[in-house]
């Protein structure tokens, strides 16, 4: 019995060694990171900048995308007769005191990317580029091609067409700043808001 127990212990030890070794082989090589940190990490510079932190931009995009994905079924049934909805980027209204609009464009594009990962969302919503971008690409890449006399525009019905708009605000106080972000879907035919989700975050300046 003692011999069998010893052999069993040795076998378990060998398996554990192999597992640990294989995990070690899969680990990324160590080296100079050149200052690279995970995207969700708050850096010292961010903490004292007065701007929204990148981890909050990531969190906001995840929450808004999740809320829209969860509301897809009820929204399409309530507002679009269970028809597939076409969505394009609309306006970003930046009323913050310091944040660049490009940060919110990143936020909006990340929302789209998260939504496109869901097959259920793609079955109910299709995203198209803005007319201005399509025209620019057409002129650059397809102008003069035989049989192409103009930009091919996708066929859309305004009753089933929405703009993804964003509104951004900051409320500034001594050593304190509150950011409020809201994304909404606006139906093209009548301007009705058919979906809305906001995100708030408040910062205190270091030493405040």
Image (cartoon, rainbow, N blue to C red):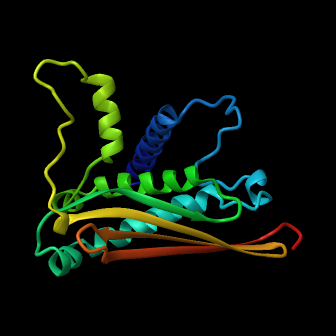
Residue found at x 85% / y 66%? 206
Q: Quadrant of residue 28?
A: top right
Q: Quadrant of residue 157?
A: bottom left
Residue found at x 45% / y 56%? 108
Q: Position of residue 177 (x, y in %)?
A: 73, 72
Position of 143 compared to 208: left or right? left
Q: Position of residue 104 (x, y in %)?
A: 53, 56
Q: Position of residue 21 (x, y in %)?
A: 49, 35
Q: Quadrant of residue 56?
A: bottom right
Residue found at x 42% / y 68%? 64
Looking at the picture, does residue 97 appear above or below residue 171? Answer: above
Foreground of the two, 58 or 161: 161
Residue found at x 28% / y 75%? 71
User: Furthest-front residue in view?
Assistant: 149
Foreground of the two, 150 or 15: 150
Position of 51 compared to 7: left or right? right
Q: Position of residue 146 (x, y in %)?
A: 13, 18
Looking at the picture, does residue 202 appear above or below residue 23? Answer: below
Q: Quadrant of the N terminus?
A: bottom left
Foreground of the two, 133 or 100: 133
Looking at the picture, does residue 90 appear above or below residue 38? Answer: below
Position of 156 compared to 195: left or right? left
């Amino acid at each position: 019995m003692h011999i069998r127990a010893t052999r069993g212990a040795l076998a378990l030890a060998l398996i554990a060694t192999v597992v640990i070794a294989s995990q070690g082989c899969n680990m990324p090589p160590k080296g100079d990171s050149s200052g690279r940190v995970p995207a969700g990490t708050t850096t010292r510079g961010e903490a004292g900048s007065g701007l929204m932190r990148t981890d909050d931009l990531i969190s906001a995009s995840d929450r808004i995308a999740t809320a829209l994905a969860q509301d897809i079924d009820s929204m399409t049934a309530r507002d679009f007769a269970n028809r597939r909805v076409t969505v394009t980027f609309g306006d970003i209204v930046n009323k913050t005191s310091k944040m660049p609009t490009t940060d919110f464009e990143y936020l909006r594009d990340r929302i789209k990317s998260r939504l496109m990962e869901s097959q259920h969302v793609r079955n109910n919503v299709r995203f198209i580029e803005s007319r201005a971008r399509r025209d620019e690409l057409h002129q650059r890449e397809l102008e003069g091609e035989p049989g192409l006399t103009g930009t091919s525009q996708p066929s859309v019905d305004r009753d089933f067409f929405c703009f993804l708009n964003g509104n951004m605000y900051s409320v500034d106080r001594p050593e304190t700043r509150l950011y409020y972000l809201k994304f909404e879907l606006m139906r093209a035919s009548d301007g009705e808001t058919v979906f809305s989700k906001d995100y708030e975050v408040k910062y205190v300046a270091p030493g405040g």
